[in-house]
């Protein structure tokens, strides 16, 4: 947890320094991004390897998907990290952007229940927990799907993100799909009005609150639960199976058709072994790179970096930090998006 928090601080400090200096970069020496905290552990690993191999520093401020997209709209960064793709309405408000998927992950339900090593949850239970209808862990409704498990009779403390978050969007997108009541009362989005619960900033913040609070449960990127050694619930998927998040169950959720622009949600997959709150995460960039005071060298450095991020070399690193790699089809469609980048209307390469 300390390592994750340190990485978050260092990334934000790097972003501040670059932006405060006007975003000036000399060719291939550095790139700057901001956004989702969800993929940060993978990004830290990938960025370090890219610098070692290519001599290019990538400074990333993990501030949440919403903040990253705002920084891109303000032309303060080379790329935004987001766990939620931009809607047609959002894309119409700024110059044309492309979405480059970088890995697969999951929003897991991590919990702190003394003596409970395995917990099963359904969509209905999640709905009732986050709407404040289930307030104690020993409730018969929870016990019914956890036979043989002794649930402590303590309060339920749902935890949610306080910042604009792609992880929130992924979780709420799933809940909206599986619960009409949720769709009516809460809906989906990066920032929501939560009926009950405890707020925390970023995936590291959610992990910290859960570790410190008996009875807490919250959604977060799977790597934060793995690295913090916080138990994760098995969730019942659309096929009726209770599934833990992992490389295989996350990859299974992405086995359907992917559109050419890669903007797709993979929650609530009907595949038997799929983890139900699986997701893609993206780097979002401008298709036309001749804006503000950017040089063609900077644009080409960004294109080279993005191409490397979806290469076999980078994708092989995903499993080291509990993410899942892109499929061949996804990687090919990502490369096609990257190849469409231009400078003054002309292809970069």
Image (tube, rainbow, N blue to C red):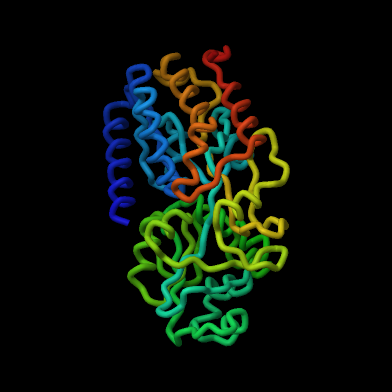
Asked which quadrant contains residue 32, the reply is top left
- Residue 341 or 21: which is nearer the viewer? 341
Where does the image place residue 72, in percent across and percent down from the top left? 45, 34
Look at the image and tell me in which quarter the N terminus lies.
Answer: bottom left
Look at the image and tell me in which quarter the C terminus lies.
Answer: top right
For the point 31% across and 26% down, which residue is it?
A: 22
Q: Is residue 154 left or right of residue 345?
A: left
Vertical order, 84 against 315 (above or below): below
Where does the image place residue 79, in percent across and percent down from the top left? 45, 32
Where does the image place residue 296, in percent across and percent down from the top left? 45, 14
- Residue 129 or 1: which is nearer the viewer? 1
For the point 41% across and 19% down, which residue is it?
A: 298
Vertical order, 174 against 48 (above or below): below
Is any atom of residue 69 visible in this view?
A: no
Where does the image place residue 108, in percent across and percent down from the top left? 51, 60
Vertical order, 318 against 147 (above or below): above
Asked which quadrant contains residue 62, the reply is top left
């Amino acid at each position: 947890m300390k390592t994750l928090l340190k990485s978050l601080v260092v990334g934000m400090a790097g972003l501040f320094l670059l932006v405060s200096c006007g975003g000036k970069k000399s060719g291939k020496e550095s790139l700057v991004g901001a956004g989702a905290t969800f993929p940060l552990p993978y990004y830290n690993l990938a960025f370090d390897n890219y610098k070692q191999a290519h001599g290019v520093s990538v400074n990333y401020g993990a501030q949440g998907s919403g903040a990253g997209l705002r920084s891109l709209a303000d032309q303060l960064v080379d790329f935004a990290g987001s766990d939620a793709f931009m809607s047609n309405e959002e894309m119409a408000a700024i110059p044309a952007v492309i979405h480059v998927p970088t890995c697969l992950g999951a929003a897991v339900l991590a919990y702190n229940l003394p003596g409970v090593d395995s917990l099963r949850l359904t969509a209905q239970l999640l709905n009732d927990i986050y709407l404040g209808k289930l307030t104690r862990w020993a409730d018969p409704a929870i016990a019914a799907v956890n036979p043989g498990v002794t649930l402590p009779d303590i309060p339920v403390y749902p935890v949610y993100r306080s910042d604009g978050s792609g992880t929130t969007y992924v979780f709420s997108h799933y809940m909206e799909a599986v619960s009409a009541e949720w769709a009516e009362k809460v809906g989906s989005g990066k920032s929501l009005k939560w009926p009950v619960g405890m707020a925390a900033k970023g995936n590291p913040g959610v992990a910290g609150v859960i570790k410190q609070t008996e009875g807490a449960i919250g959604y977060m990127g799977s790597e934060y639960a793995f690295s913090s050694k916080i138990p994760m619930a098995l969730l019942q998927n659309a096929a009726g199976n209770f599934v833990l998040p992992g490389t295989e169950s996350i990859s299974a959720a992405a086995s359907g058709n992917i559109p050419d622009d890669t903007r797709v949600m993979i929650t609530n997959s009907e595949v038997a072994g799929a983890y139900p709150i699986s997701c893609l995460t993206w780097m979002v960039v401008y298709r036309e790179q001749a804006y503000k005071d950017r040089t063609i060298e900077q644009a080409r450095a960004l294109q080279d970096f993005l191409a490397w991020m979806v290469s076999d070399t980078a994708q092989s690193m995903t499993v080291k930090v509990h993410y899942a790699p892109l499929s061949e089809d996804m990687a090919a469609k990502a490369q096609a998006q990257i190849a469409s980048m231009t400078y003054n209307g002309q292809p970069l390469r």
